[in-house]
């Protein structure tokens, strides 16, 4: 057992917290979206919260951790949904939110520390340069930029720009290794794939350089449709209308909008599906023309409302905020999935799945660009009954050519890749020889012989010892 009093002494001058209540709070993310993870991870906690304010302090923390064989789990705003920043082996939770300074703003790019909140960065960028991030998570008011890169994949703006792992959507990362003498490394271009969406398992991000786009006063609009498939077809047509500049397109099936979008309820019709959209001001006239052509009805338009106090932004209705709004009102009734509907017949795949599951799996899509082509990913609400039925629903999707990136797993591979990422594994061997960075999240490190096709879940030994199932 590490001597945490000695570790605290060696970290003198760096902010350290060991109050059990605060440590537990900082050891959590939104894992409880999943009833499976809620049971598995409820007892997970770190031992110390350490909050470095500079890269030098990060290096000092990692040297001490290496010397004492203490795990280190980096954390931003804690807005992930499947335990990405939860310390399965205890140890140090490295809270990066004090490293929140913007270093440089240039035409087309920004250099910043990783702990800055995405919304704060966008506010300052717009004010100082008329620019904004190309895309951001729906949790932009809480999520840090470094955490988004380490745990996210895309977001509000991906309809135009694609995802975080697309070449050019992150320009440079500066990281620190966990060795006896930590090294500082700078990664660009394809080398970024070594640490992007790696949950901090093979490098602690200390600086980020991101590309920017022109900032617009995006107009939030909700369009009503008779059926979910009407909303899907409208969304697909809008996504392919290259001349209409949009930042968000999310078709959502009834009864979700009227039942769970409580602040927008006065504008919505019961039984209607909707499309939640963010439109650039200069694109409003052609957008309205398309709505009319596709027989939709504009139910809410933010630029025509005098009082928007308390009204959430459009992006706070989409992505996993949709799930959150349902869980807040009916916490035990729902969970969700992350489904890909590969193009070019993505609309037909959605129709097929909608017909197959009916009201058990309630449609919610996010339109985006994937390898340059328009397609959609799903974050459908699932009426939850048993773990076994949830697995059946996943298997049925995959049998119909709709891969599920399982949000009920805490490992990199099971949640997304479903296979070893050889590049990230090799980099971990180089940067983290003792395996102390966020242990338990990379199966390829913990159990190189794990059979991803055997139909069993990976359970990290630390969780197995705690009695999790």
Image: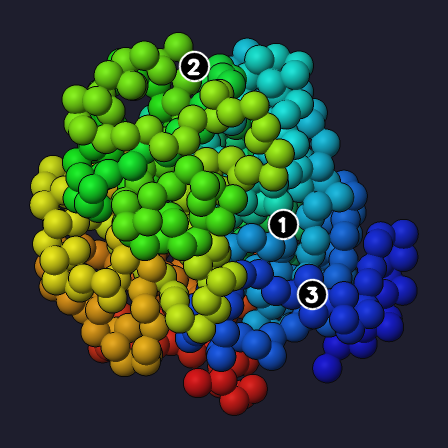
Disc 3 crowd, CA 10 A, few/some/many (<14, 14-19, 20+)? few
Disc 2 crowd, CA 10 A, few/some/many (<14, 14-19, 20+)? some
Of residues 371 and 119, which is closer to you in this image?
119
The Cα–Cα distance between marks 1 and 3, rounded to whole angstroms, is: 13 Å
Residue 235, percent across and down?
Answer: 24, 33
Q: Secondary structure at mark 2?
A: helix
Q: Is the residue 323 above or below the residue 233 in the image?
A: below
Tell me which numbered mark, 1 or 2, is placed earlier along the sequence: 1
Q: Is residue 435 left or right of residue 285?
A: right
- Image quarter (top left, top right, bottom left or bottom right) of the C terminus: bottom left
* Residue 31, numbered circle: none
Disc 1 crowd, CA 10 A, few/some/many (<14, 14-19, 20+)? many
The Cα–Cα distance between marks 3 and 2, rounded to whole angstroms, is: 41 Å
* Residue 25, numbered circle: 3
Of residues 422 and 181, which is closer to you in this image?
422
Residue 174, percent across and down?
Answer: 59, 37
Tell me which numbered mark, 3 or 2, is placed earlier along the sequence: 3
Of residues 375 and 278, which is closer to you in this image?
278
Q: Is residue 447 visible?
A: no
Coloration mode? rainbow
Residue 96, percent across and down?
Answer: 69, 48
| Residue contact between numbered discs 1 and 2, judged by CB atoms under 8 Å | no
**Image quadrant in which you'd find residue 352:** bottom left
Q: How many marks?
A: 3
In this rendering, the label closer to the viewer, 3 or 2: 2
Q: Secondary structure at mark 3?
A: helix
In this rendering, the label closer to the viewer, 1 or 3: 3
| Residue contact between numbered discs 3 and 2, judged by CB atoms under 8 Å | no
Which residue is labeled 2 in the image?
A: 281
Which residue is labeled 1 in the image?
A: 76
In this rendering, the label closer to the viewer, 1 or 2: 2
Q: Secondary structure at mark 1?
A: loop
């Amino acid at each position: 057992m590490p001597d945490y009093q000695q570790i605290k002494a060696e970290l003198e001058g760096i902010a350290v917290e060991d109050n059990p209540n605060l440590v537990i709070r900082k050891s959590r993310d939104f894992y409880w979206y999943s009833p499976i993870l809620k049971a598995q991870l409820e007892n997970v906690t770190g031992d110390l919260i350490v909050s470095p304010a500079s890269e030098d302090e990060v290096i000092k923390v990692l040297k001490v951790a290496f010397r004492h064989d203490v795990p280190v789990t980096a954390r931003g705003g804690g807005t992930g949904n499947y335990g990405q920043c939860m310390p399965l082996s205890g140890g140090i939770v490295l809270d990066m939110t004090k490293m929140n300074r913007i270093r440089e703003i240039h035409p087309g790019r920004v250099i910043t520390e990783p702990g800055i909140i995405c919304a704060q960065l966008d506010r300052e960028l717009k004010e100082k340069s008329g620019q904004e991030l190309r895309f951001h998570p729906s949790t932009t008011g809480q999520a840090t930029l470094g955490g988004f890169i380490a745990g996210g994949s895309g977001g509000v703006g991906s309809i135009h720009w694609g995802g975080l792992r697309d070449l050019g959507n992150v320009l440079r990362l500066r990281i620190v290794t966990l060795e006896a003498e930590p090294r500082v490394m700078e990664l660009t271009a394809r080398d970024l794939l070594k640490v992007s969406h790696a949950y901090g398992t093979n490098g602690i991000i200390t600086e980020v350089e991101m590309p920017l786009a022109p900032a617009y006063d995006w107009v939030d609009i909700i369009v009503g449709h008779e059926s979910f498939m009407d909303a899907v077809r409208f969304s697909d047509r809008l996504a392919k209308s290259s001349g209409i500049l949009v930042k968000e397109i999310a078709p959502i099936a009834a009864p979700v909008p009227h039942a769970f979008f409580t602040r927008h309820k006065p504008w919505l019709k019961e039984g209607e599906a909707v499309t939640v959209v963010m439109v650039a001001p200069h694109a409003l006239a052609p957008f309205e023309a398309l709505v009319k052509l596709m027989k939709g009805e504009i139910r809410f338009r933010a630029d025509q409302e005098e009082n928007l106090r308390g009204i959430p932004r459009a992006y706070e209705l989409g992505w996993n905020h949709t799930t959150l709004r349902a869980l807040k009102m009916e916490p035990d009734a729902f969970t969700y999935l992350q489904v890909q509907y590969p193009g070019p017949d993505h609309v037909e795949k959605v129709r097929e799945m909608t017909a197959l599951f009916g009201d058990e799996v309630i449609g919610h899509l996010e339109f985006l660009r994937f390898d340059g082509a328009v397609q959609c990913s799903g974050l459908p609400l699932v009426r939850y009954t048993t773990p076994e039925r949830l697995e059946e629903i996943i298997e049925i999707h995959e049998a119909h050519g709709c891969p599920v990136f399982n949000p009920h797993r805490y490992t990199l591979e099971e949640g997304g890749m479903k296979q070893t990422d050889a590049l990230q594994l090799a980099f971990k061997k180089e940067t983290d020889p003792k395996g102390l960075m966020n242990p338990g999240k990379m199966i390829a490190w913990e159990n190189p012989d794990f059979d991803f096709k055997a139909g069993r879940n990976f359970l990290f030994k630390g969780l197995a010892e705690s009695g999790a199932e």
